Amino acid sequence: VPGDNITCENTDTISLRQLPRPTLNALLTAPTTCTAINGAIAITPAPANSGPYSFTWTTATGTTLPGSTSAQTGLGEGLYRVQASGQP
């Protein structure tokens, strides 16, 4: 009713929770010599039933490696970074 100075209010409680981050386990295969490019890295997310994930691989200098799978082959000595994206 206009002029009665009554206001309406609605209150609700919303809970947000952070999902646990997956753990990424790496299986490393070193190159056979310091100049060889036959090393490999295979990533397994845990828990095993999590995912699916897409993987972004980069070198220490920021160069993006091809592919978005959980493994890279044909690697030389060096530092590599992997980022997993997806639904836990």
Image (spheres, rainbow, N blue to C red):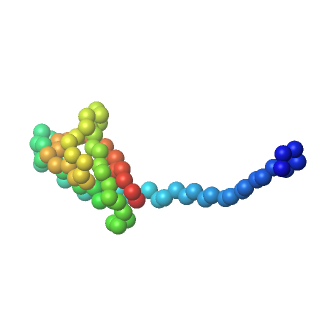
Does residue 84 show up?
yes
Q: Work out whether residue 9 or residue 30 is closer to the camera in this orientation and state it.
A: 9
Q: Residue furthest bottom?
A: 49
In terms of image quadrants, where is residue 21? Answer: bottom left
- Is residue 20 shown left or right of residue 57? right
Task: Name the image quarter holding the C terminus.
Answer: bottom left
Q: Residue furthest front?
A: 1
Q: Position of residue 6 (x, y in %)?
A: 85, 50
Q: Position of residue 8 (x, y in %)?
A: 78, 52
Does residue 65 sit above or below 29 in this rendering? Answer: above
- Is residue 45 shown left or right of residue 17? left
Residue at position x 34%, y 50% in the image: 84
Q: Position of residue 76 (x, y in %)?
A: 17, 42
Residue at position x 33%, y 66% in the image: 48
- Is residue 53 shown left or right of residue 74? right
Does residue 24 sit above or below 68 in this rendering? Answer: below
Residue at position x 76%, y 53% in the image: 9
Does residue 41 show up?
no
Q: Position of residue 44 (x, y in %)?
A: 29, 59
Residue at position x 16%, y 49% in the image: 73
